[in-house]
Amino acid sequence: MSSAKMDGKLKQPLDYINIVLQIIEHILSWTGPEKETQVKMPYLVVDSNRKMQRAYIIKDNQIVSFAFPFQVYDKLDSSTGNCVWHVRYKDIDINSTILSRSRGLYSDYDTYKDKQSFREIASAQNLSDSDVLKAIRLFEILMFTEPSYVRYDYDPKGANGLRHPLCHFDYNFIDSYHYKVGLHGCINLAQLEDMISKDTDSWYVAKYRESIQEKQKRLKNRFSKIKRRQSKRR
């Protein structure tokens, strides 16, 4: 758990790469666990184990979660006597140089993607540099990773009955494939982790059922509109 402000919104696949690279940068410079009472919004939680590799960004009325396909661990630095945090993917132990090269690839691709393919942008790099090759591989890993995006929202400003429930999950960050699942009440990080975890009981989705009072109100509004239309025709 760590206080962490991530810049940018998730609206397209390249945004996912940007956010993940920011998280890696934050972890590599992290000095260690913070006291829960001192952590400020927004804060970051990374779950890194054999069964689950996800990141959670917790804000005031929102929890964003997505795949973070890396192993995170700390190791004692014999020269300083301090624990240093590492981010690793298989044989790639990501250091500040590899991260910097990856950020450069992101900037180039974000700027020139309409004119050049990633292959062309990568080929223009110094391919004799092993860190560059690792950065290209890291970037490709993120390009082909399933983001597994889910966002929990408590949204009193945008709430609009059943069309936009006060509490809901948003799945998929690209607008064309985005959809909502309404909730009956607020949830917290522990409940979201419970829903995602493979080691806990599954959650079930059911069509929302109106209460008798809600149904009466809906029918009353419907009949009122019919009467108004009929009176205008006379």
Image (cartoon, rainbow, N blue to C red):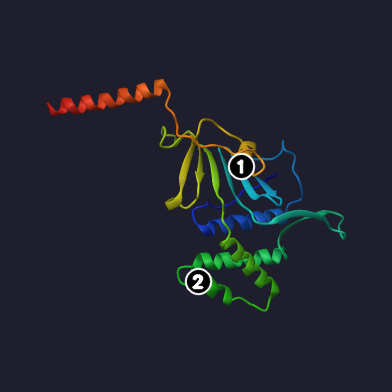
**Spot occupied by residue 156 in the image (x, y as percentages of width and height):** 48, 33
User: Could you tell me which quadrant the N terminus lies in?
Assistant: top right
**Spot occupied by residue 148 in the image (x, y as percentages of width and height):** 56, 51
The amino acid sitting under disc 1 is Ile
Q: Nearer the viewer, residue 144 or 234?
A: 144
**Spot occupied by residue 17 in the image (x, y as percentages of width and height):** 58, 59
Q: What kind of element bears circle 2?
A: loop
- Whether tag 1 and tag 2 are in contact, CB under 8 A, the answer is no
The amino acid sitting under disc 2 is Ser
Residue to which mark 1 is pinned: 58
Up-down relation of residue 138 to residue 223 (above or below) = below
Name the residue rendered at 55%, 49% in the picture: 149
Q: What kind of element bears circle 1?
A: strand
Residue to which mark 2 is pinned: 117
Disc with the residue nearer the chain's start (1 vs 2): 1
**Spot occupied by residue 37 in the image (x, y as percentages of width and height):** 72, 35
User: Could you tell me which quadrant the C terminus lies in?
Assistant: top left
